[in-house]
Image (spheres, rainbow, N blue to C red):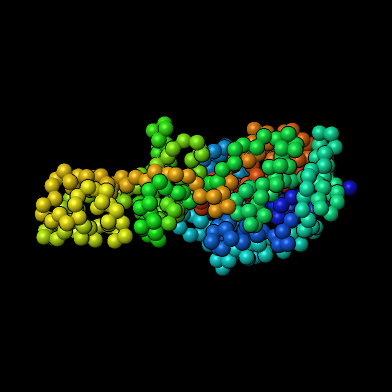
Amino acid sequence: MSRTAIVVGGGAAGLFCAVSLARRGTECTLIEKNRALGKKLMITGKGRCNVTNNCESGEVMRNIPRNGRFMFGALSRFAPSDTMSFFEEIGVPLKTERGNRVFPVSDRAADIVAALERAAAASGVSVRHEKALELIFDGDRAAGVLTDRGERLADAVVIATGGRSYPATGSTGDGYIFAESAGHTVTRLLPSLVPLETEETEPREMMGLSLKNVSLKLVNLVSGKTEYEELGEMLFTHFGISGPLVLSASAHINGRDKYAVDIDLKPALSYEQLDARILRDFSQTLNRDFVNSLGRLLPSAIIPIIAGRSGIPFETKVNSVTREQRQQLVETIKGYRLNIKGFRPIDEAIITRGGVSVSEISPKTMESKLKKGLYFAGEVIDVDGYTGGFNLQIAFSTAFAAAEAIANSNL
């Protein structure tokens, strides 16, 4: 008699886990409360779906700020190269872009979802659009799921319900409730890969300005430690800051301490080189007002902000700017500080930080250490990565580990 399994959640982890189970001869039922599968997948990568990062497994772990080592076993079994091979095999040609980000050649997330749906149908997955209400246990074993249509029993249950980000897609935190009902610890839930609100209103004045090739440093004002530092792109908004650098920095904010970001607008230039560059620009505009002399150095939208922070009166003639004033200007450009007020709401976050404690899950099989036959996959686990396809790789690798373990287990 073949093994039976129920996968709760029809997102990236759930769909992939169901396909992997069915391909291994397990009779698999996929339960999804939405009318459509892969609803969150459809909006990832701004609708293009960054399916993975074309790198080695070790690089994936380096892009997971917490609990990266937990992923060692799962990534050993299913690496980014395996993810790419899988999607090419099911009819989705892929391409690698800047930062090793992998997208479908079509730039359509819908093609990823459609291919997964076809693979599920071809492998015999039974899809049920029902709402899972609670887990069913038989002693210390998971024995099935109670849905709004009745009981569904199985040898194994996989929780792949996602986190709490983008609740409109169905990620409303159901999996955490199921985990707690099995006795699991759910760590503190915070938004991650989320824009940040600033104490200052200056970003509103620069709203829409995108900066490239700047360096951003996240500083914990309580400990004085630099928690994150990277070169890349960012964006000013009506509430504060966003963009790739900011989203990755947000993954390091613990929700308790105070933080600030220091932005180096000219990271390619040392303090001395920047001073020399400013002197050169000044030499060409000797009788111009100071505020009108920075157009070759900085985007126009940020000039009034930086000029104001430097303390040099706007109408000061360039040939009257002192060496000390120039040094203050250099320091302002090399260290434009914004104080962080907090995260944007979790429904604007790409992913949820926190989840089912990894200390209570087998890293090799994704099986609960508390209940036999209960498995976890994807965002519901307390593992999250930076932007760049790492979070979907976490979803696929954990789903594969769970499917392989269920198919090979002696139930």
Q: Which is nearer the eye, 244 or 205? A: 205
Residue at the bottom extreme, as displayed? 106
Mark count: 0
Measured as percent of width and height from the top left, residue 381 is found at: 64, 42
When the figure is inspected, residue 214 is found, relative to residue 137, above or below; the finding is below
Image quarter where the C terminus lies is top right
Q: Where in the figure is residue 346, as x and y percent of width and height?
A: 56, 49
Residue at figure coordinates x 53%, y 42% from the top left = 64
| In the image, farthest residue toward the right | 1
The spot of residue 185 in percent (x, y) is 67, 34
Residue found 73% across the figure and 34% down from its top: 183
The answer to whether one can see residue 204 in this image is yes
Q: Residue at x 61, y 61 (%)?
A: 42
On screen, residue 72 versus residue 260, left or right, reads right
Residue 170: image quadrant is: bottom right
Q: Is residue 89 visible?
A: no
Residue occupying image coordinates x 44% and y 53%: 239
What x and y, as percent, mark residue 124?
79, 59
Location of residue 338 with respect to 291 vertically, above or below: above
Of residues 228 and 34, the one drawn nearer to the viewer in this rendering: 34
In the image, 59: left or right of 233?
right
